[in-house]
Amino acid sequence: MEKGEALRVENLKKYFVVRKGLGGLLSSRKTEYVRAVDDVSFSVAKGESLGFVGESGCGKTTMGRAILRLVEPTSGKIYCDGIDVTSLNKKQLKSQRRRMQMIFQDPHGSLNPRRTVSEILRQSITIHKLADTKAEEDVMIKDTLEEVGLEPAEEFGERYPILLSGGQRQRVGVARVLVLRPKLVVADEPISMLDVSVRIGVLELLLRIRDEFGISLVYITHDLATARYICDRIAIMYLGKIVETAPTEVIYSNPIHPYTRALILAVPVPDPTVKMEELPIKGYVPVSVTDTFSACRFYPRCLYAEEQCAKEDPPLVEVEPGHYVACFRAKERDLTDQKV
Amino acid sequence: MTKLLHGLSSVKGFVMLLWTNKMGRFGLMIFAIFAVIAIFAPFLRTVDPNATGSCENMLVPPCAQFWFGTDDLARDIWSQLIYGSRISLLVGFTAAIIAVAVGTAVGVIAGFYGGKIGEVLMRIVDFFMMLPTLPLMIILAAVLGPSIWNIIFVVAIVSWTTTARVVRSQVLSLKERAFVEASRCIGAGDSLLMFGEIFPNVVPIIFAQAVLVVTTAIYSEAVLAFLGLGDPTTVSWGMMLHFAFESGVMSRTPNWIAPPVASIVVLIIGFTFLGTAVSDVLKPGYKETRGL
Amino acid sequence: MALLEVRNLKIYYFTRAGAVKAVDDIDLDIEKNETLGLIGESGCGKTTAVFAFLRFVTPPGRIVGGKIIFEGRDIIPLSDEEMRLLRGQGIAMVFQGAQNALNPVMTVGNQISEVILEHESLTKEEAWERAKEQLELVGIGSERVKNYPHEFSGGMKQRVMVAIATACNPRLLIMDEPVTGLDVIVQRQLLSLTNALREKMRLPIIFITHDLSVIAETCDNVAVMYAGKIVEQGSAVSLYKDPLHPYSKGLIGSYPSVRGEKKELKSIPGAPPRLIDPPKGCRFSPRCSYAMDICRTEEPKLKNMGDNRMVACHLIK
């Protein structure tokens, strides 16, 4: 574990057993798994925000939960600030939770409708015994509400979620974890369910807490456009694996993996004079994936596939400093030459 | 105005919301009337309902002194009716509270933990649901003996299962909600999740169930008392009907039969309306569609 | 004569607390060969407005005033039966989250044929053949005509909805947030399909979304709605190059792009107003950084700026 690393994940796997039902009991096929997260490794530096971008089914949401052990990993190691999270017992995990938190996607569902804002924040404080008296708790609640922009704090504290707008509810979601002063926050699509004009405010809030409090962010999203604004580095995921990772601007200016290129070309451009181009991808994301893969996951959809791609799974290889790609043809000129 | 908007978080708001619903208003009024009758019984021109009297006061038809007349032991029917409301409400509420408490506990635990614990608990629920209620009540009441507490116990035993099922299914769906996961992520343990997060969201359903169990309880008590399994020293409406039946003059004394029957029916209807209103009011989006 | 002319359309929802003025006096024109994008945030009234075009407004909502003139005929006073005939054949709609609108126990072939048989007097076999053609049209092979909805992915289900909506060759297609919630590559495939429909079938489309970038990819003209009113209208190109209304400016400034330089993003402060009690004067004034006194007292009317552009703002002369 290097100094300055807030999070290190090694060979993380999460497999779900496919339930076979009655018919399955009678058949003799071996158990099938959905390999939601399949051998993912990465690290996040202190105060850095790493984005995980991919479409639905790529495993990013499962991975986010596995990092926090909200879902138990099948195998692999997770180190947060030097501590091996995977080996903690229930009690130790509870106190470790203070340092690793999550911001959820659904502003409506992630707040208990029968609790006021201050009760929701108070729960964070009391579970981790962060204050000795109620007065101290009140001060912490007030300060945190102000930090996330919910002012006047006294008024917001008394409100029930139903009276808050989507953006305000997400701010409460941020406040709930901010009061713990965590080292790492996993943000799972925090703005995708908000109105467009409100999204930037929440993004700016996340950036501010990262900078002011030195919190490292794992930012999960399917929206490449907004990821650009909050992430220092981006990892592209496809079917449970990381296929490319690089500093943000490099991903946008020099995407190498065919899937990344397709993703970037697919994002609509808010400029009517730019015409939509043909996407360098074929087929669709498989409806369910349980087959054993000894080939590149992207092979069925790749326009540049070769023989080797059908037989082996390409490892992540450093193509240029800080830029890793999982593709046998990553270093070839004809793919990398086409600038986006 | 804002009170009504998040009114479900306070009892007062809840009652106000019920009042806006036609059925709820009716149910609340019935409940209020009987509650007043039960509480203020001594002030409603009543005498001791158990006080027997002299021969010339037996089976007197309604008159100025005895508003509903007297029974075959010269007891004032009006007083019996008034004091009987206390028994009905007492049995109704107590049995309902016990049944709902047990049902909720079983439902929450079965729903939250699922797995083997859930399965075992639900099979117990299934077993109890299988038993025919009336025969079971009769047997238990006969075995345990006539006392008001036995009646309450017997009624509760047959009434808790629906609550368990309803609560369990509510908990199953609540368990998956993001705010429960969020609390778990903060570090809440199982009991805090069950009682701090899930339970408050189950309370509305419990209310609705409780109101409906009250109707079953009142009815069951009346039936058991009528069959002679009740406590003869406490005059409930069912008991009144039992005495009327035993006396042999039932067909000639409508003033003896009608009041208890009417009371039972009205109270049950009132609570049924109230229960329906409670479950309507608690449906998500109720306030919005009514424009509140 | 335009294909669809909307004049002074007002739709209010009558609640105990008062009337929610969901759509408050809007005018719209759609020509025969045009794709009009209707953009606005949630609650701005865009869905309510198009529901009115199909007469789907249900109580407590009611069309309180105005005219909706389709092919020269005001459809508001039409009888239920006349309206029923119009739906699907005259005007058709692809709904939001339409993937969930498919009947899980019917094959997609049957669901498409059902619509055809409702409006045209064909035999079952003929309708089935047409259903297969529809599936080809939307890019799903006709061999899948016997499949059930659960055998398709989200994006493909959306295409099935398009197949159903276009089955009877409607003269106007409305798509309500058709790509919201879809993954970006799937979204792109659906947008390409939409563009292909425009060209192949010469189908005029009203495209509703809250996503500016999606409009840029598909629409000729754009109408921007805010709080029940149309605040700006014009060609897509002119709106992006030179937005006039402060809200349009704010919207465009809040859209990140993956291409080119990373530009500075600005958020619009505040939140959309509650339509039970909209602000006096211009509804956007509480959030507008250019608001003048007149903006808070007098509601600006849509002014024709020439060159097919309209804007409702006191700042623009």
Image (spheres, coloured by chain):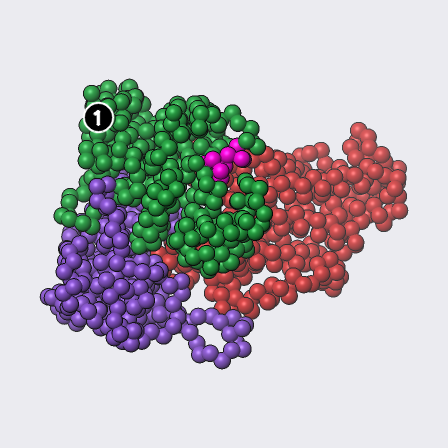
Chain colours: A purple, B red, C green
Q: Position of residue B187 (x, y in %)?
A: 33, 61
Q: Position of residue C244 (x, y in %)?
A: 21, 29
Q: The C terminus of chain A is located in which quarter?
A: bottom left
The segment highlighted magenta reads C83-91
Q: Is residue A19 left or right of residue A203?
A: right
Q: Position of residue B162 (x, y in %)?
A: 60, 56
Answer whether residue A98 is visible to the viewer in this image.
no
Q: The N terminus of chain A is located in which quarter?
A: bottom left
Residue indicated by mark 1: C291
How many labels were placed on the picture? 1
Q: Is residue C165 above or below residue A311?
A: above
**Image quadrant of residue A308?**
bottom left
The amino acid type of the residue labelled 1 equals Ala
The residue sitting at 38% across, 72% down in the picture is A291
The residue sitting at 79% across, 31% down in the picture is B65
Camera-nearest residue between B132 and A281: A281
Q: Is residue B152 above or below residue C231?
A: below
Q: Is residue C22 above or below residue A18?
A: above
Residue at the far bottom in the pictured view: A28
Camera-nearest residue between B128 and C168: C168
Q: Position of residue A228 (x, y in %)?
A: 19, 52
The residue sitting at 63% across, 53% down in the picture is B95
**Image quadrant of residue A221?**
bottom left
Which element type, helix, strand or loop, lies under badge 1? loop
